[in-house]
Image (cartoon, rainbow, N blue to C red):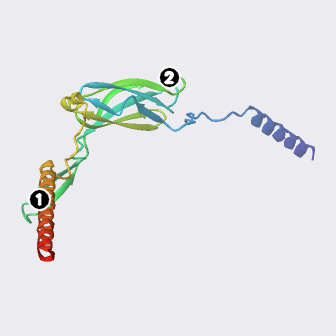
Amino acid sequence: MRLHRSLLLALLFAGVGTVSIAQPAFAVPYPAVPPVIVASTATVSDGGQVAFDGNGFAAGEPIVIDLVYVAPQAAGARTDRHRATGGFVTVHFAPPRAVVKTINAETDGTFHTTVTLTTPGIATVTARGTMSGVTAVATVTVLAAAAADSGNGPTLARTGTDGRLYGWGIGSGLVAILLGAGLIGITVKRRRRTDG
């Protein structure tokens, strides 16, 4: 009985000792806030630089910055004529990604970088943390230099009527009024002759 009691006490002390010196397993800290990347401007002319600020990444982790250009008209689709049926087939393709640079996050998980955007269209800039695996995306419209310099940006289609149509409408209205006044004048003269 003493042997059992001694063994039981030894196991109890061993268990308490193990629990008291146990430590949590190492884990990469999960970002407290969702990752965000913000561009300094929404529109830039081709060849212009845009500053990007981000947060929500692991402290000091490498962040890969890459970008994709998509022409606004195409938006990733191309239409080809199908030879066999004479119809049209829309072909979707993924635009190529280009890694621009790799930077390191600050100790608080933030970063700041600038990127030169060179191709007109929609530029999608992605920041991806290599340790945490989190990503954040921002888009910037890149205008051709001539469109950006004009200050007007993309032009809208002209709708409505031409100014010459207003002239015809006003002229026709004046002719109708003069004809109506002339007919009234003739009617009044005839009544005076018949009454008089």
Q: Residues within 10 Å of mark 2 (few under 14, many from 20)?
A: some
Name the front one of labels 2 and 1: 1
From the top left corner, tell me how far across and down residue 121 is, in percent: 24, 38
Q: Decide if residue 97 is in sight here.
A: no
Q: Residues within 10 Å of mark 1 (few under 14, many from 20)?
A: few
From the top left corner, tell me how far across and down residue 37 is, in percent: 43, 33
- Count of labels shown? 2
In the rendered image, which quarter is residue 9 located in?
top right
Q: Is residue 93 above or below residue 149?
A: below
Q: Residue 159 vs residue 67: left or right?
A: left
From the top left corner, tell me how far across and down residue 123 is, in percent: 30, 36
Question: Residue, x 15% and y 63% (percent of image)?
Answer: 181
Q: Decide if residue 85 is in sight here.
A: yes
In the rendered image, which quarter is residue 46 located in?
top left
Q: Is residue 195 above or below residue 118?
A: below
Q: Residue 2 vs residue 171: left or right?
A: right
From the top left corner, tell me how far across and down residue 53 is, in percent: 44, 28
The answer to whether the residues at label 2 and label 1 have Cβ atoms under 8 Å apart is no
Nearest the camera: 125 or 190? Answer: 190
Nearest the camera: 10 or 132? Answer: 132
Q: Is residue 96 above or below residue 161?
A: above
Under mark 2, the amino acid is Glu
Under mark 1, the amino acid is Val
Q: Residue most toward the right?
A: 2
State the residue position of label 2. Answer: 106
Quadrant including the C terminus:
bottom left
Please tell me which of labels 2 and 1 falls first in the chain.
Answer: 2
